[in-house]
Image (cartoon, helix red, strand yellow):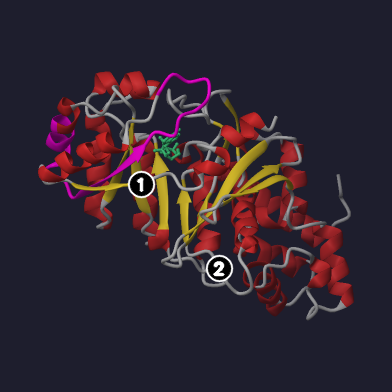
């Protein structure tokens, strides 16, 4: 562990550390591991924390702005390449922080629809996936993970098949975005973020919101908050916490809820976590999100052959959502090897969508782009082990 901080810097680090402990970020980390991460890891520090630390290193405020411009706008993750900083400042920063990016790129896969999927390995050997999606409307979308593994164990999803390992830190979430942004040529930047990779956002909400706060700021990646979607399995307490945060910060993220079934019996079969809650409870929380933020909630419905695609499911789903200002995103299942579920035919998907629309529900089909490169999320991490 590096302990060569000048005393003021040491106290700044300590105060940052205790603030993080109070906010609960340190819950999963041992004291020393976390202190090490915090002292040396650039992306773990918020704007205010970094300002405090740089000040204690006797670097003037404008240096902070310069460094952020390099990291976020100019896609440079190496202090030595920040040529408008003097050699001594570059050396000071390199000594304290080492490298900015901490993961190793284990593999990069490209598909014919211009999606790219990265498999990243962190310093503890754990791996996650993130994906860059591109379309002809100039959308450059990053899909990021929030946890290593997942505790939700949705029956058709690869992410939870080996259980939950740990939460990602704020810096690890920001790093995925920086790496995906750097895949884009020249000055092109990410335009959208979907939190639809591995893990359950509501179970790592503090780190996620801190990371999103960073990248949506004007001197971060400057991505509009309206173009950021957080997808949850449907944890009412988490949704309420997000609502509070949005009310407090004004950052109106888009909320998507993975519904996948129109009644509790079927939903609990598909999503075991549903047994501890209910569709009614989830809808109460999403109604409140809509009322307080004015943002329509999207309901994701992964369509699985002969399981949740029957005529009675269409009737029940329409009944559930008719009185709500909501959108349904139908996602044909991307089959996961080793799991028994199958994707419905194109005709069956179309029938489901048309009949739902006929009942007054706003509905879209969303094919999971990039799936050709490594199939559904969570699979690359499993197969590349
Ligand atoms: N934990 C969050 C994010 C998960 S991934 C959530 O549950 O929403 C984002 C979406 O992809 C979820 O709706 C998830 O159910 C869906 N998904 C996961 N695996 C899939 C697969 N094999 N085929 C189709 N959709 C899948």
Q: Of 323 and 330, which appears nearest the observer? A: 330
Q: Quadrant of residue 312?
A: top left
Q: Quadrant of residue 125?
A: top right
- Inspect this view and state whether residue 241 appears: yes
Q: Going by the image, does 370 lie left or right of 55?
A: left
What's the residue at 51%, 47% (across, down)? Answer: 370
The answer to whether residue 275 is left or right of residue 96 is left
* Residue 219 in which image quadrant: bottom right
Q: Is residue 321 magenta?
A: yes
Looking at the picture, how far across and down is residue 308, in whole percent?
27, 26
**122 lies left or right of 3:** left
Could you tell whether 343 is left or right of 122 in the image?
A: left
Q: Nearer the viewer, mark 2 or mark 1?
A: 1
Does residue 230 show up magenta in the picture? no
Residue 323, visible in the rendered structure: no
Q: Which residues are magenta?
A: 315-341
The first of marks 2 and 1 along the sequence is: 2
Q: Position of residue 127 (x, y in %)?
A: 67, 37
The quarter of the rendering in which ligand 1 is drawn is top left
For disc 1, the marked residue is: 366
Q: Is residue 240 above or below residue 74?
A: above
Residue placed at 54% from the left, 48% from the top?
144
Quadrant containing the N terminus is top right
Question: Where is mark 2, residue-wise?
Answer: 189
Q: Label 2, label 1: how many angstroms apart (C-alpha)?
A: 23 Å
């Amino acid at each position: 562990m590096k302990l060569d901080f000048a005393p003021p810097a040491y106290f700044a680090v300590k105060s940052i550390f205790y603030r993080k402990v109070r906010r609960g970020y340190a819950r999963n980390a041992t004291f020393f591991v976390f202190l090490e991460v915090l002292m040396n890891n650039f992306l773990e520090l918020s704007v205010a924390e970094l300002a405090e630390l740089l000040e204690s290193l006797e670097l003037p405020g404008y240096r902070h702005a310069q460094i952020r411009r390099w990291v976020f706008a100019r896609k440079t993750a190496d202090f030595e390449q920040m040529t408008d900083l003097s050699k001594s400042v570059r050396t000071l920063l390199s000594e304290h922080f080492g490298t900015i990016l901490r993961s190793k790129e284990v593999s990069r896969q490209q598909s014919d629809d211009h999606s790219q999927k990265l498999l990243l390995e962190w310093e503890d050997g754990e791996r996650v996936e993130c994906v860059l999606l591109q379309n002809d409307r100039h959308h450059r979308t990053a899909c990021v993970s929030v946890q290593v593994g997942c505790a939700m164990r949705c029956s058709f999803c690869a992410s939870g098949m080996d259980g939950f390992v740990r939460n990602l830190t704020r810096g690890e979430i920001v790093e995925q975005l920086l790496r995906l942004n750097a895949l884009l040529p020249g000055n092109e930047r990410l335009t959208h973020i979907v939190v639809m990779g591995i893990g359950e956002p509501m179970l790592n909400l503090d780190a996620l919101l801190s990371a999103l706060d960073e990248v949506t700021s004007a001197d971060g990646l400057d991505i509009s908050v309206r173009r950021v979607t957080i997808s949850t399995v449907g944890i009412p307490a988490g949704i309420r916490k997000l609502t509070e945060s949005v009310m407090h910060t004004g950052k109106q993220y888009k909320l998507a809820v993975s519904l996948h079934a129109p009644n509790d019996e079927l939903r609990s079969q598909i999503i075991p976590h549903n047994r501890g809650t209910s569709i009614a409870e989830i809808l109460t929380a999403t109604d409140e999100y809509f009322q307080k933020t004015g943002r329509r909630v999207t309901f994701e419905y992964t369509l699985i052959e002969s399981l949740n695609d029957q005529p009675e499911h269409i009737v029940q789903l329409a009944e559930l959502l008719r009185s709500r200002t909501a959108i349904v995103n139908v996602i044909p299942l991307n089959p996961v090897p080793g799991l028994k579920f199958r994707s419905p035919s194109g005709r069956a998907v179309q029938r489901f969508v048309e009949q739902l629309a006929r009942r007054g529900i706003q509905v879209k089909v969303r094919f999971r782009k990039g799936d050709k490169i490594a199939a559904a999320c969570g699979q690359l991490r499993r197969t590349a082990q």
